[in-house]
Each structure stands twice: as structure tokens, then as C-alpha cells.
Image (cartoon, rainbow, N blue to C red):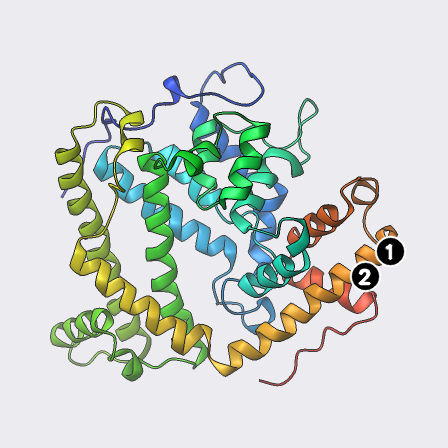
Amino acid sequence: MTFSSTLAPFASDPLRSRGRRLFEEDAPTRNDFQRDRDRIVHSSAFRRLVYKTQVFLNHEGDLFRTRMTHSLEVAQLARSMARALHLHEDLVEAVSLAHDLGHTPFGHAGQEALNACMEKLGGFEHNLQSLRVVDFLEERYASFDGLNLTYETREGILKHCSLVHARQLEVMEPGGVGHRFIVREQPSLEAQLCNLSDEIAYNAHDIDDGVRSGLLSMEQLQSVPLVAHYSQETLKKYPQVKDRRWLFETIRLMLSDQVYDVIGTTQEALKGAELQSSLDAKHHPMLVRFSEPMQLASLELKAFLSQNLYRHPRVQKTTEQAKEMVRDLFLAYSHDPSQMPLAHQRREDKERAVADYIAGMTDRFAAKEHQRLGGTTRWHEQ
């Protein structure tokens, strides 16, 4: 199966971009979405993703996924599907690589702890934090804060946003990236594709990491219809296969069918929608989607992973330790801001400065800081 890389009329076009918050001259050899992608790759926040937890903490093993490897896998899936759907590949890559820039150390445990610490001051949302990173917190350019990305990339980064925060964004940027959450519009097709690629990627690699960790087994996974189907297909084709090759082949087949399911289902939805431009997608229900059977199968897999991996006693134990570290760090910096770098000390929004500083940490830096400030980095035996 081959696909042309020609853009469809409903694809986002950098020549019709809503532009950047601060005007810049066009680059001579790159379109605006390529330029966004390059800025993200060269950012400090992107480099830190290599030492940020996905499910298993950084110290638990070198081969488990991190936020960076997850983001790369999302980008690979999204680009593959974007080409088949004639969407803009550079935009989906930029959004995919940036979507987790605002994640805290220690994965969702860190986010939950930081959200609780900031509860009286608006809470903490990692998607909103990713936007803060690219809009304000990166310090690379002499003429502006952040990365000054295009509207289209920023819209894709802000995957979720509470209505309260959307209204705050609307005050700062009328008609900007928060607006769609207020008027209940959809994001671009490229953003929709990145959202679904994120789901496909983490379901697949969490199976892999779960088995690698010993918390899941191939036998246990046979209770999940989606996994069992491809597992049995693998055994029919390769009766002697076992262990890692059985797992990898099962995941490969599952990923391939999910990708082709999204492509086929979305192509049919797009035909029915008869879009004339990228803006038309905003006024339709989600167009980039699974078929109904694949969606149900994916939800069953997510429920299984939630119960058997994310809530596994071993994962829960390290989760509670991680939350304690984040709470301790927040209290320590709030009590004594001089423990932070000067740029954070000087900010007037003290608590948000503390949250920004902690959110930007890697797992190992947060652990070292916790120890430096009087805590411990020792993880209890699993």
C-alpha cells in the first residue's frame, strides 16, 4: 500500500497559518511547522524528557519507556498516519514531540501531588504546563520568552484544558488556543491525530514494559480480547515462537491493525464530512477516530492496564513515595525560595514559580534535590 504525500484541502497549511504570537520573518528553507518542530527538538524541556517517568521510574531500568521515547513513538505513528490521510506531517510531528513537555518528574504521581499543592491557586494541568513551557518558560531566544510557536502547534499541544483555565487563556489571548474549549469546537485534524496516536502508543508500550517488569505476563494478557487475538495469530504463524519475540510480534500486529483501522475509519468520516478547508473540521464531531469495534477493544485494554499495571502494588508503592517527594519539595521551596535559581526566586507569583521549577525537573534531579533539602533518595525495596 502506497500513499501520496500531497496535502488534502482539509489539511493544515503553513502558508495559511494563524501565525506566531510575535511576528517573525519566514525561514528561507523551512516551512513554519518544520521550524516549530526544530525549536522543540532543541529545547531544554525536550532534552529533559529522557529522564522523566512514563510508568516505571527512571532508576528502575534502562529499557523502560521515558517521556522522550514515548514522544518519539507517538511522532512515528502520527507521521505514518498523516501521510496516508494527506495531513501535514511536520505539524503532527511538532505536536507529538511537544505534547508532554509540561509533565512533572515521576509521571502522573508527580502531577497529582503538584496539583494538590496548587489546589488553592488553580491547580496544575500538564497540558496547560506544556503550553506554558513553549509560550513562556523556555529561555533560548534573545527577543522573546518561550519558543514562539505557531498557533496550530500550540493548539495541538493543549490537548485538554479546564473551562476555568480556558477562560483565563481567553483573557490573555482572545480567540486563541483556549477559545475552542469555551465554544466546544474541535482542534485541527492533525491535533486529533496526535491525540489518538498518543493513546495507541502508550497502550502498546505499556504492555511491553509491563511484561518486561514482570508485573504482567503473556498468559495474563490472554484475558484481553484485543491482545489475545494478535497473540493467537502470532502462534498460528510461528508455532515455535516464545518469550520476547511472541510479545513483540503480538504488539506489532496490534499496532499495525490499529493504524490501518484509524486510517480507514477516518477516510470514511472525511468523505462524509465533505470538508473544504482545515477550519471546517472544527465544527464536526471528532473525525480522526477508531472504528466502533476497535474503540471498544482499546477501552478494554486500557481498563486492564489500569487495574493490573498502573494500580499494581509495586507501582502504587513507588507512586506514593514519588508523591511524598514532590510534596516535600513544594513545601521546602515555598518556605525558602532562596533554594531555587535566581530567576524563580525573583518572580512575584511565588507558588506558581515553585510549581514551574518542580515540573521542569527530571526524576533524578528531583530525587537529588529532595536529599539535599533534608529528605532521602532511597527507594524502598519492591
Toward the viewer: 48 or 277?
A: 277
Q: Residue at x 37, y 72 (%)?
A: 305
Q: Residue at x 23, y 56 (%)?
A: 258
Q: Secondary structure at mark 1?
A: loop
C-alpha span from label 1 to label 2: 6 Å
In this view, 70 is above or below 380: above
Residue 67 visible somewhere in the drawing? yes
Q: Are marks 1 and 2 in contact (CB under 8 Å)?
A: yes
**Quarter of the image where one finds residue 136:** top right
Q: Residues within 10 Å of mark 2 (few under 14, many from 20)?
A: some
In this view, 195 is above or below 284: below
Kind of residue sitting beneath label 1: Asp
User: Can you identify the residue that label 2 sits on?
Assistant: 332
Numbered circle sitting on residue 336? 1
Q: Secondary structure at mark 2?
A: helix
Q: Residue at x 75, y 66 (%)?
A: 328
Kind of residue sitting beneath label 2: Ala
